[in-house]
Image (cartoon, rainbow, N blue to C red):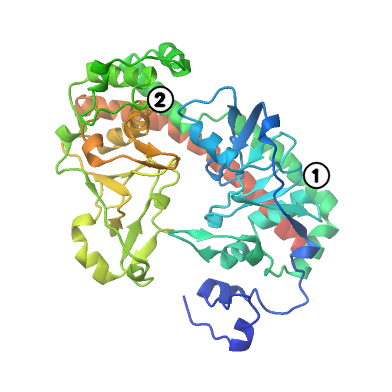
Amino acid sequence: MGVIKTSFHKLSKEYSLRFDFNYIKSDSFTNSNDYDYRALFDIIDVEKVDIALLDDFKYAEIGNVQSGGDVSPVNLSFNNRTDENENLFKKIERGDIFLPECGDILLAKIRPYLNKNVLVGENKIYFTTAFIQLRPKIDSVILYNLIRSLFLEKINAVSRCGKGYPTLNDRDLKTIHFPRQIIDSVVAKSDILINEIKCIEQEISVLKSSKTPHIDIINEVFGQEFGFDWKKFERLKEQKIYSLNLSNSSRSVDCRLGCRFHQPAAKYVMDFMSKHTNKRIKDFCVEPICLGASLSPTNYDESGEYKYIAMSSFPNWELNINDSKSVSNEYANRNQNKTLQKGDIVLARSGEGTIGKVALVTDDNIQAIFADFTQRIRLDNYNQTFAYYYFRSMFFQYLVYKEKKGLGNNTNIFPSQIQDFPIPDYSLDKQQEIVSKIETRINAQKDIDKQIADKRQEISRLIESAIKQV
């Protein structure tokens, strides 16, 4: 990491006297001949949306944005509130919604390093207020691509360490100084650059249209193997009114009466899987499913040998070890019973949008402690990759939806519930056959992802070339 010297004089120029390494390294608070944010964009205050005027509309949270900037909003209507989308409506009713203009740039306030930044297009999409809204003063295509590439490090440098992950606020964004030479060089060739970028973006759009989401592949393969009736399932999901007799309320040990628990579609999935197999997850566990270790901020240590695997460590269903925080060796030694090893499956047990997400440990030499808001599932005599894909499928995730407890964003699910979920009882050869079917198709999608990433690199190289030529 190295050593950087600074002065109290420089520290005093930032309103909160921050002295974290990345911020000081970025030298964001120095006076220079560079442009500040006012030369490039305005930061727009969120305007209140009159939700009484909303009918059918599209809404996007940070989780609906990919690292490439693609947005996959959900379609909502106040006339069609369901158990599945009720949490979104509650957020919207609390004012967590705004409508940006075409050409605006949105920066994610949470984990900005993921580059989930959006160039707003002509499609009318409402967004969560967890984005900062920028209105460019230079061409929006140029500024957006500068933010995604050359200026991303500057944005990450001014983000602050939040509760487990970095956060960005507009006040810190205003401290960034942007190199005048780079801006002037790119603006001077903006007409040529924009045409070339648009051609590449068209090629990217064609590649995107050929993609199939991984979850669709997983559900399709398992649905074919199980002989699942998708049409009946969708009909039951649409059913809004249903009755419950007293005998059905006894189906749970705690006599649950919630509509989500007794929803016909949820009952159909549970009954279907219970008829398909008589095995439960606990039948293949080498040890009981357990919760992870809690910690306090003092337990973090950048020089520690162990990582702390929180729910934020696998936002895309894969462990992101590099962006997970390190804990002290002393803390790790005290929690050796909460370590991970290759083949373990980590499951998020709390929070809407996160609960039920899983990640498979594939690293032979992993040194990590899993968090108290996650569960460790350690299987024996079972193909862990098969289990991982099954846990990602609708057949498992809908059971999580059915069984989770709590209201609003404060929902939880516990090992005592997960262990009794049904799990397919196929031979190891059959499990591997299904894994191969899924991975063959997913790998084809990853090839498309690589082509898209290469195209985005072309855009970055165009901008860098324009800088060098002037």
Residue 230 sits above or below residue 97 on the image:
above
**Label 2 belongs to which residue?**
219
> Is 199 left or right of 244, judged from the image as shown?
right
The mark nearer the N terminus, 2 or 1, is: 1
Q: Nearer the viewer, mark 2 or mark 1?
A: 2
> Is 449 left or right of 428, judged from the image as shown?
right
Residue at x-position 40% and y-position 30%: 440
Look at the image and tell me in which quarter the C terminus lies: bottom right
**Labelled disc at residue 195:** 1
Mark 1 burial class by Cα count in 10 Å: few <14, some 14-19, many 20+: few
Across and down, in percent, residue 185 comes to: 80, 63
Amino acid type, residue under disc 1 in the picture: Asn
Callout 2 secondary element: helix
Residue at x-position 39% and y-position 62%: 325
User: Picture quarter containing residue 421?
Assistant: top left
Across and down, in percent, residue 118 comes to: 65, 46
Q: Nearer the viewer, residue 451 or 350?
A: 350
Q: CA distance from mark 2 to mark 1?
A: 40 Å
Q: Nearer the viewer, residue 222 or 229?
A: 229
Callout 1 secondary element: helix
Across and down, in percent, residue 416 comes to: 21, 38
> Is 70 left or right of 384, judged from the image as shown?
right
Mark 2 burial class by Cα count in 10 Å: few <14, some 14-19, many 20+: some
Q: Nearer the viewer, residue 365 or 120?
A: 120
**Labelled disc at residue 464:** none
In the rendered image, is residue 207 in sight? no
Amino acid type, residue under disc 2 in the picture: Asn
